[in-house]
Image (cartoon, rainbow, N blue to C red):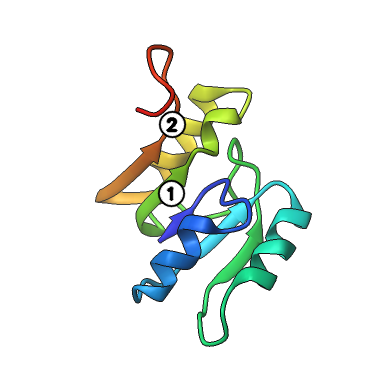
Amino acid sequence: MLDVTAGTGNAAIRAAQAGAQVVASDLTPELLEAGRALAEQGVSLEWRPADAEALPFGEGEFDTVMSCVGVMFAPHHQASADELVRVCRPGGAIGLISWTPARIIG
């Protein structure tokens, strides 16, 4: 599973605790370092610097790609959306939690 714009890993850490193999990616190395510090002993996940608009992963590399109030802040939404689709395997799942124009969370 890939968490794009994971920040400090609030969703990625929970997924790893539930048994998922997780790669948490973010453009900001300081957030990834903070996430590493927050991860509990015994929770295994990979922390990778990555730009949501140019992900350093192969096509179809992940069964699940997610972003929890993160990728929506990328400046070029279409480029980011294209990357999420590219790294997700055919038939995989993409999940987003984002603010919307009509409401805070959608």
Q: Quadrant of the C terminus?
A: top left
**Secondary structure found at label 2:** loop
Q: Quadrant of the N terminus?
A: bottom left
Q: CA distance from mark 1 to mark 2?
A: 20 Å
Q: What's the amino acid at mark 1?
A: Val
According to the picture, the residue beneath numbered tag 2 turns out to be: 98
Lower position in the chain sequence, tag 1 or tag 2: 1
Rendered image quadrant of residue 97: top left
**Is the residue marked by circle 1 packed among few (<14), some (14-19), or many (20+) residues within 10 Å?**
many
Q: Residue at x 33, y 44 (%)?
A: 94
Closest to the observer, 11 or 22: 11
Question: Residue extending furthest left?
Answer: 91
- Check contact, mark 1 vs mark 2: CB within 8 A: no
**Secondary structure found at label 1:** helix
Examine the rendered structure and indicate whether residue 31 appears above or below residue 36.
Answer: above
Examine the rendered structure and indicate whether residue 96 appears above or below residue 19.
Answer: above
According to the picture, the residue beneath numbered tag 1 turns out to be: 87
